Image (cartoon, grey):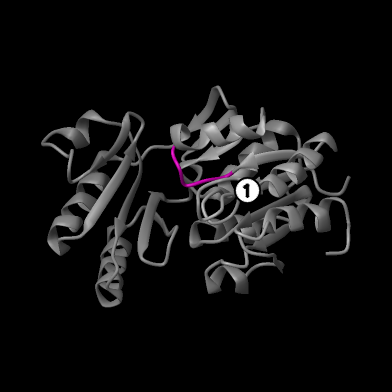
Amino acid sequence: MKYRLLALDMDGTLLTDNHQISPETTKWIHKALDAGVHVCLSTGRSYSEAAPFGEELGLDTPMITVNGSEIWRNPKELYHRELLGPELVEKMYQLSRTFNIWFWAYSVEGLFNEENWYEGVVEEKEWLKFGYNVHDEQLRHKVLMELQNIGGLEITNSAPWNFEVNPQGISKASGIRTVCELIGVEMSETIAVGDSLNDLAAIQAAAVGVAMGNAQLAVKENADYVTSSNNDDGIAEVIRKFIFAEEV
């Protein structure tokens, strides 16, 4: 079989806007699994937010969570974790206060934002990802400039109005490379599917990079193929076209 690993983003890709996996998409994922394809969830979500959907699909394959900061050998066993240093987290927290913008931060211990942030939390926790919601375009540009000045950060998004920040060099692409090493698959045998800038590196690195019909423009422009939207079984279309070589 030409393609042996199918890496799927979740929100805006695998999941409909109602945060569900459609019956048609489920059917074709099971067909891919039965054909020997490794189906890997590749998400910005935390493990606890992603794992129930892997369980729903019956996946026992590696999983990429928090945009590549965690690689799971299987749904129950962590293989690798990459942390944001506390000094970077403190700088990003202070940036949120300077601009008075909503922030959120994933730690190994859970999700934090301004509602449960407290003095000393930065040093106490192990940090995986930091994020901001910034709906004002001009302000968003200012925030981006400041983030770039901090350095040592991988800056993407999961929606046009937010930023997601991981340690530099950590992305879904680095996650897919690690998964390939784990399961003995070449990058030339991979398909990556997504809709946002946190999928872009993976889409560019995979043998076939697929943008959803609802994807951000930059993702579509860099993809090898644009499939149907997340509400129109775009994943099923990808499996039919690239894994089973059906006309779609």
Task: Examine the image and state in which quarter residue 129 appears.
Answer: top left
| Quadrant holding the C terminus | bottom right
Q: Is residue 71 visible?
A: no
- Disc 1 crowd rating (10 Å Cα; few below 14, some 14-19, many 20+) is many
Residue type, label 1: Leu
- Residue placed furthest toward the left: 119
Q: Residue at x 73, y 49 (%)?
A: 190
Q: Residue at x 51, y 43 (%)?
A: 68
Q: On screen, 15 above or below 150?
A: above
The verdict on residue 160 being magenta is no
- In this rendering, would 92 be left or right of 201? left
The residue under label 1 is: 8
| Quadrant holding the N terminus | top right
Q: Is residue 86 visible?
A: yes
Magenta stretch: give its range. Answer: 42-46
The verdict on residue 45 being magenta is yes
Q: Position of residue 102 (x, y in %)?
A: 23, 56
Q: On screen, 139 above or below 58?
A: below
Q: Secondary structure at mark 1?
A: strand
Q: Nearer the viewer, residue 71 or 244?
A: 244
- Most common secondary structure along the magenta stretch: loop
- Residue placed furthest toward the bottom: 138
Task: Examine the image and state in which quarter residue 13 appears.
Answer: bottom right
